[in-house]
Image (tube, rainbow, N blue to C red):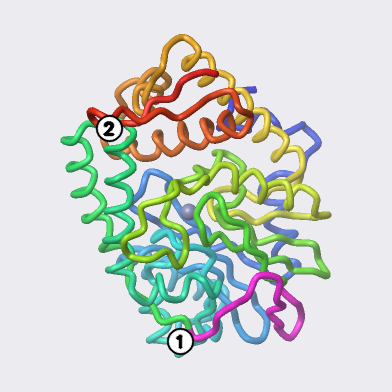
Amino acid sequence: MSGGRTGELSAMDEPNEQELLAQAADADIHRLAIPTPFQVGRVNAYLIEDSPLTLIDSGPNSGKALDELEQALAVRGHAIEDIELLVITHQHIDHFGLASILARRSGAEVAALDGLALYLRDFGISTELDDRFAQEIMLRHGIPADVVTALRAVSASFRAWGSAVEITRQLRDGEELRLRDRTLRVLHRPGHSPSDTVFLDESRAILLAADHLIAHISSNPLLARPLGAPPDFTGPRPRALVDYIASLELTQAMDLSLVLPGHGSPIADHAALIDERFRMHRRRAEKIHGLIVAQPRTAHEIAVELWGNVAVTQAFLTLSEVLGHVDLLLDEGRVVECEDSADAVVRFEAV
Ligand SMILES: [Zn+2]
């Protein structure tokens, strides 16, 4: 089975998407698939018909997203003004961009992980710092300067789909978010982003997982500034894939009846899917090891070797992928990091 796509994984007797969505609906959790302008396609917000009336994630800041969200709420007999609690799962704009508009119109409380509150309040500054951090990493790992410049422009244009939002209820890892008919356990699961937070409906063993686990694509462990890092943060380089694998191990050990992800279909067998992800990461690490054994290379050279000259917009994603897997090899003592004093670019060498 190839990494990334897991359609083949589904055995014939596995429940289909409609059955799994019906299982969620029995728990008064309804998927609202909101359009985004991004390659990932629609993002899943989840409406929990409980007290308070709760929305998990908002979709991006666009008129089309707002319009479709309003229609999806209306199908359930609600308006935006009825939302009482808005919960944000992580720092990516396709998940929280509409939050400030929804909060203003509804007066809803806005809840998110405590470490995420400042990031979202100062969203403009946060993304500016993120871009600067990404630029440093890209240059250090061999991405050509013209590509780095082009990517900054792309990132700046994406910002309009986000929006600063005030978090009125800060959540601590492990705490309980109590609704009338359920308790949601707040669990910090960094990796895909530093702020990834999943919510466990404890009595039903349903996990609202956002981008921590997705059925049809493997979540990118994106390199990002650590939460709460000072503005001038340059390192040490965060280890997103190492963190992500540790988070996946915690999730795999959970006894779950259903996982509701931030994109695509619900997941019935999370443990098998996570096993498949582990195998894929292992294969990729070994492939990268082979390339480094053949000759010392920069992370960018490895990315080009694996995926060719990808679109400019994908350059940071593929760099994050390579560095994540190199971190596994560094931990195993099979690779070392060597900085070239002439150009300050890092190359990886086999031990
Ligand atoms: Zn995300």
Is 286 located above or below residue 138 in the figure? above
Q: Which of 120 and 115 is in front in this view?
A: 115
Dot 1: element: helix
Amino acid type for the residue under numbered disc 1: Glu
Q: In this view, does 192 lie to the left or right of 20?
A: left
Q: Which of 302 and 279 is in front in this view?
A: 302
Q: Name the residue under label 2.
A: 143
Q: Is residue 94 left or right of residue 192?
A: left
Image quarter hosting the C terminus: top right
Q: Name the residue under label 1.
A: 81
What is the x, y in percent for residue 60?
A: 38, 63
What is the x, y in percent for residue 104?
A: 38, 86
Dot 2: element: loop
What is the x, y in percent for residue 304?
A: 35, 22
**Looking at the image, which residue is at 43% across and 59% down?**
92
**Looking at the image, which residue is at 53% across and 24% down?**
335
Say whether residue 311 is visible.
no
Real-space CA distance between mark 2 and mark 1, rounded to the nearest whole angstrom = 46 Å
The magenta-colored residue range is: 168-184
Q: Is residue 248 left or right of residue 2?
A: right
Amino acid type for the residue under numbered disc 2: Ile
